Image (tube, rainbow, N blue to C red):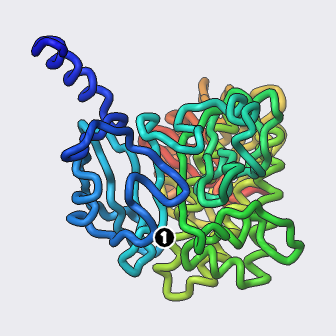
């Protein structure tokens, strides 16, 4: 028999292991493990109810939270241990468990692979079947079915600067690891089928569509066409972007998807989605704009429309010089362009006097111009911005 001191140390060690060691009343300590039927007694027949779940797995802390979605919110239940989430339960809306999403390596899997395991190892051991690129909210990941059952899928994540919607080369993918292990009952395994090409459908897989806006896009030929068009524009931008810009583009795209999905709140969701797609397509296409050699007419200063009879314009020369009209006088400056960063120095100009309204506009313009430190395209408009400055232009 172990001494009391050794037993105390062993118990402390087991406690540190968190989700891995699960005490069960009246039995030896066992591992919390996923299998085809579910997780440690939580199955498709289990009520989505914390008291019931607590009786099944009493050794974790259960917490019900509201998770924001495109349709408002949904209720999920988190299973935590020592403040760390081990897995999340999702409901089918009728009081039953529809999915278990495991994010902790300390939760076992009868089939073998766990969170943190490398793609190379799982593939070499023959533990994964078909794989496909994650789409929409799972963009930038690769999803693989367990070879033994379609009820369990593995979500692989890692670093890659290639285009979204494609599986990375094997040499890259082999270094990716499992970030999530997901279980779903048979009646929902259809939502994880690999996407199939369909000339009339959107770029994402409609069999995995979730939410009213995704369903709307899948049901509308017009919206599906816009989604295909957007996918092409996005792929073109990703293909020509630097690694740093690719990371930014992916973050922007995820934010845009969330904004598009908010169209369910609109009085006319269909038109809202159309407008959102058109704006994003224009934005992605315009991002290929190169400033040197272009000329622009001032439209707004800090959101205030410039009167039509006040001439504010500028031209970006190929030699790094910026010239134009500041409303009353001609001005000149030097600009330094580094991707989306823009610095304007050495502003000067003529000193002619004009009516007060023109002089006021000129003063505001030149003051803002000196504060500019970046630029962006918003639809077809050029935005120069900085701390306390925003100037809007339209191309001549």
The kind of secondary structure element at disc 1 is loop
State whether residue 367 appears in this view: no
| Residue at x 53% of width, y 44% of height | 110
Q: Position of residue 296 (x, y in %)?
A: 73, 51
Q: Position of residue 210 (x, y in %)?
A: 58, 71
| Residue at x 24% of width, y 64% of height | 50
Residue 157: which quarter of the image? top right
Q: Position of residue 212 (x, y in %)?
A: 56, 79
In the image, farthest residue toward the bottom: 267
Q: Position of residue 158 (x, y in %)?
A: 64, 34
From the viewer's perspective, is 311 left or right of 224?
left
| Residue at x 37% of width, y 69% of height | 46
In the image, farthest residue toward the front: 1
From the viewer's perspective, is 196 left or right of 16?
right
| Residue at x 45% of width, y 74% of height | 92
Dot 1 surroundings within 10 Å: few (below 14), some, or many (20 or more)? many
- State the residue in front, 70 or 154: 154
Determine whether 280 is above or below 3 in the image: below
In the image, farthest residue toward the left: 4
Q: Report the quarter where the N terminus lies.
A: top left
State whether residue 148 appears in this view: yes
- State the residue in front, 29 or 50: 29
For label 1, the residue is 70
Determine whether 66 is above or below 252 in the image: below
Residue 96: which quarter of the image? bottom left
Q: Report the quarter where the C terminus lies.
A: bottom right
What is the total number of numbered labels drawn onto the structure image? 1
- State the residue in front, 144 or 232: 144
């Amino acid at each position: 028999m172990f001494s009391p001191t050794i037993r105390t140390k062993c118990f402390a060690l087991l406690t540190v292991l968190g989700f891995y060691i699960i005490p069960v009343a009246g039995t030896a300590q066992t591992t919390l493990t996923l299998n085809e039927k579910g997780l440690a007694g939580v199955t498709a027949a289990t009520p989505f109810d914390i008291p019931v779940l607590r009786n099944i797995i009493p050794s974790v802390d259960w917490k019900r939270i509201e998770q924001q979605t495109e349709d408002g919110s949904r209720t999920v239940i988190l299973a935590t241990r020592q403040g760390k989430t081990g897995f999340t339960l999702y409901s089918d809306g009728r009081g039953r468990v529809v999915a278990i999403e495991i994010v902790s390596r300390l939760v076992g899997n009868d089939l073998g692979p766990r969170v943190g395991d490398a793609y190379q190892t799982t593939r070499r051991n023959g533990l994964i079947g078909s794989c496909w690129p994650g789409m929409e909210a799972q963009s930038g990941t690769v999803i693989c079915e367990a070879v033994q059952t379609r009820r369990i899928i593995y979500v692989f994540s890692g670093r890659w600067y290639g285009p979204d919607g494609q599986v990375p080369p094997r040499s890259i993918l082999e270094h990716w690891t499992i970030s999530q292990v997901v279980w779903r009952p048979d009646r929902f395994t259809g939502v994880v089928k690999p996407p199939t090409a369909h000339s009339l459908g959107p770029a994402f897989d409609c069999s995995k569509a979730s939410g009213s806006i995704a369903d709307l896009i899948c049901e509308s030929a017009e919206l599906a066409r816009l989604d295909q068009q957007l996918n092409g524009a996005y792929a073109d931008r990703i293909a020509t972007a630097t690694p740093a810009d690719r990371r930014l583009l992916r973050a922007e795209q995820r934010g845009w998807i969330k904004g598009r999905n908010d169209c369910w709140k609109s009085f006319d969701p269909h038109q809202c989605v159309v407008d959102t797609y058109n704006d994003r397509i224009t934005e992605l296409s315009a991002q290929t704009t190169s400033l040197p050699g272009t000329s622009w007419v001032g439209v707004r200063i800090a959101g205030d429309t410039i009167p039509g009879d006040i001439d504010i314009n500028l031209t970006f020369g190929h030699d790094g010089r910026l010239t134009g009209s500041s409303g009353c006088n001609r001005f000149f400056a030097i600009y330094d362009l580094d991707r989306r960063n823009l610095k304007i120095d050495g502003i000067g100009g003529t000193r002619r006097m004009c009516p007060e309204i023109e002089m006021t506009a000129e003063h505001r313009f030149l003051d803002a111009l000196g504060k500019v430190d970046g630029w962006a395209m918003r639809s077809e408009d050029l935005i120069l911005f900085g701390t306390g400055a925003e100037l809007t232009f339209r191309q001549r």
